[in-house]
Image: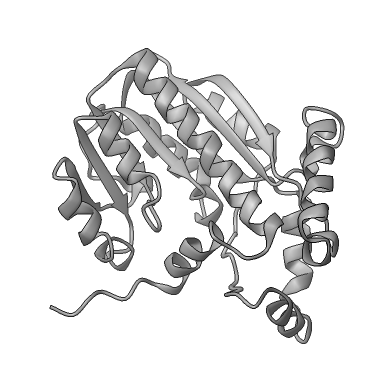
Amino acid sequence: MRPVTPPPLVELQRTLYASRNPTRRWLHQSRREHVESALRRLAKERGGTDALEVGPGSGIYLALLCELFEHVTASDIEPEYLDHLDRVVAEHPNLELAVDDIASSSLKPESFDLVLCSEVIEHAPEPERVVAGLRRVLRPGGALVLSTPQARSTLELASRVAFLPGIIDIVRRVYREPILPTGHISLLTVREVEALLASNGFRVLERHTGGLYLPLVAELGGRAGLRLARRLERRISRGRLDGLLWTQSWVAERSR
């Protein structure tokens, strides 16, 4: 059987966590570390047997979910985004794949103790329907781990410039790695995400923002540029400039 070639965006995700650019690598690894920490903590404190990841991408969280829960489901609206996960399924017999649109899901209601939805809602034309779908499949009292970019972060603003004709060629020469359009069509602010969660019957337990991109410093500053970004991130987190940070991560509970 010929190996399945992952979609370009999945292949891109795999390279981001090992990027040769220190800032690019940190932006993705720090989000991954925060999400994994939340998953471990919730599994230990709350228990539960069934977990779902909506939009698993390259599958970076699936091994951990399979370690923490007895039964794990990974769902995506596009079959091709699941086809490349056959190796992960072979290594983890408690994992199953499901082609499903969480915005109008056919998964059984109230069937999961924990749902992970990382970097998904920004790709959805109607994120409110996605959040409603996440609540539908969670058991009462179940936990949601959600992450999505901040609408006004420096990275999202710079991305709009980076893909302009001519500029994108320079960016690709600087990074010497895949640079693809993100497909972010529904970027939200912290207040907007908080309102979405509240209106769909979620109680927020935690919120974290992190990841500061400094244009040109990230590309030209190397490790020194990364150290500067990390220092500034700590200073502005939860302050007036918090919205400049790239990622917002949430832990919420479905109200009973």
As rendered, which of 137 and 230 lies closer to the eye? 230
242 sits to left or right of 60? right
Q: Tally the numbered discs.
A: 0
170 is higher (above) or lower (below) than 59: below
In the picture, the quarter occupied by the N terminus is bottom left
Give x and y (percent) for residue 147. 54, 40
Q: Residue at x 35, y 71 (%)?
A: 6
Give x and y (percent) for residue 253. 45, 20
Give x and y (percent) for residue 8. 45, 74
Residue 69: quarter of image: top left
As rendered, which of 63 and 186 lies closer to the eye? 63
Give x and y (percent) for residue 214. 82, 55
As rendered, which of 134 and 85 lies closer to the eye? 85
Q: Residue at x 36, y 17 (%)?
A: 44
Residue 80: quarter of image: bottom left
Q: Residue at x 74, y 67 (%)?
A: 160
247 is higher (above) or lower (below) than 240: below
In the picture, the quarter occupied by the C terminus is top left
84 is higher (above) or lower (below) than 110: below
As rendered, which of 235 and 9 lies closer to the eye? 235
157 sits to left or right of 91? right
Question: What's the image's color scheme?
Answer: one colour
Q: Residue at x 74, y 77 (%)?
A: 174
